[in-house]
Image (tube, rainbow, N blue to C red):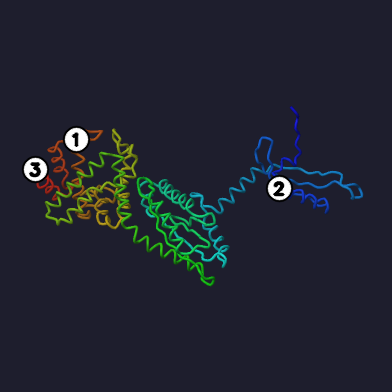
Amino acid sequence: MLNQKKSFKDLIKEEYRQILWDKWQEVIKEKTIFQDEYQIITADGRQKWVWERGRGIYTEDGNSLIALEGYITDISEMKEKQKRIEFLSYHDHLTGLYNRRFFEEELRRLDTARNLPLTVVMADVNGLKLINDAFGHTAGDLLLATVAKILKREARADDIIARMGGDEFLLLLPKTDSSAAKKMTKRIKAVTDEQKVMYLDVSVSFGWATKERTETDINEIIKMAEDFMYQKKLFESASRRSDAVKSILNTLHLKSLREEEHSKRVSKLCEAVGKAYDLSEEEIKEFGAAGELHDIGKIIIDEVILNKADKLTVAEWEVIKRHPEAGLRLLTSALEFQTIAEYAFAHHERWDGSGYPRGLKGEEILWEARVMAVADAYDAMTCERPYRPALSEEEAVNEIKSNAGTQFDPIIAKVFVEKVLGKKW
């Protein structure tokens, strides 16, 4: 086998060879210093960045070139760091899309007559706070990354897509009229509507506006796109939030069958109390919904704790005690559930003020929450738990009686025992 030898020139990446040759010729002619950076391909095929500094060596009269001398340094690591810094300065770290800084620079560059009509599209991800509250910020990040991936895939190569912060994205579409933007957003929306994150449907609201004349201020166009987006968001999001809350409840039930059965029984008990107090049909229905949703905040609790067979530790109990606040955040996100949110929030308060989360006492606690407290406790006592057997109905009634005036509103407790359970007080 022949021992093939390569000159250093052969290692230089082809696109740099002529440029470097021309630069060296200039250096030799002018008797100056050569310095430049370029890429080489090593014998094992790896690409590396190098920095070279050198000069010519001449005869004493300076008329003839004798040799070239200098040195070459591997700067690959430095270039990689520089590349990373440049990337981060113009990109959103979570989604990989451009950031606000880059968008604003590109906006100035593209805001010219040759790019008209120039359309700005604003996209707002619905339900980010809801997902963060229910499943944590990791799930929220997944939602944003999912939307970003779809936007990048569906947009054209020349379109600029940027995450502006939070749940908002902006798209800059050169040479695109309003009709084309509408078709594009409809296509993207069809794709996003097919996606799910943490069992919840992905939803994005879009608004757009088009600059058609050079004298129009581009910032007015952005404002118009934003206003249009918020109009559509108000129209779309109310039912979406309601559906999302219901999906979160279903997700909780998937995590724990016991929680599903408990919620349904508490719902029926609350309706029964409503009938005992001669509430209207609408009020009874609302009461039943409150009973079914009263523990929705438990979605934040790890299923290992929810389904634990042993008694909870002090730390685990502190996690459990946070669920009313989580439930309040979730339920108040949807207009449909805002009234019952307060009932659910206070169902662990006690008549004597020793409950949680606010330590309310007596009639400071909403009447509906006081009813729910009795229904919730009765069902918990009469159902078997991994760490204790179920109480009989008689034993549970005795517990309610003995705790009336401390844990429970004494009047509601008496009505519950006599009219719902049909037992003597």
Query: Residue 379, image x and y in percent?
Result: 19, 41
Q: Which residue is disc 2 drawn over?
A: 16
In the rendered view, does 59 fall on the left or right side of 340? right
Which disc, if any, is residue 423?
3
Q: CA distance from mark 2 to mark 3?
A: 94 Å
For mark 2, give the secondary structure.
helix
**Which amino acid type corresponds to the residue marked 3 in the rendered image?**
Lys
**Which amino acid type corresponds to the residue marked 2 in the rendered image?**
Tyr
Q: Nearer the viewer, residue 241 or 154?
A: 154
Furthest residue to the top?
A: 1
Query: Residue 415, image x and y in percent?
Result: 11, 49
Q: Which residue is disc 1 drawn over?
A: 390
Q: CA distance from mark 3 to mark 1?
A: 19 Å
Furthest residue to the bottom?
A: 215
Q: CA distance from mark 2 to mark 1?
A: 81 Å
In the rendered structure, which disc, 3 or 1, sits on the residue that comes first in sequence?
A: 1
Screen quadrant of the C terminus = top left
In the rendered structure, which disc, 2 or 1, sits on the residue that comes first in sequence?
A: 2
In the rendered structure, which disc, 2 or 3, sits on the residue that comes first in sequence?
A: 2
Which disc, if any, is residue 57?
none
Callout 2–callout 3 Cβ contact below 8 Å: no
For disc 2, the neighbor class at 10 Å (few under 14, some 14 to 19, many from 20) is some
In the rendered view, does 39 fall on the left or right side of 364? right
For disc 3, the neighbor class at 10 Å (few under 14, some 14 to 19, many from 20) is some
Q: How many marks?
A: 3
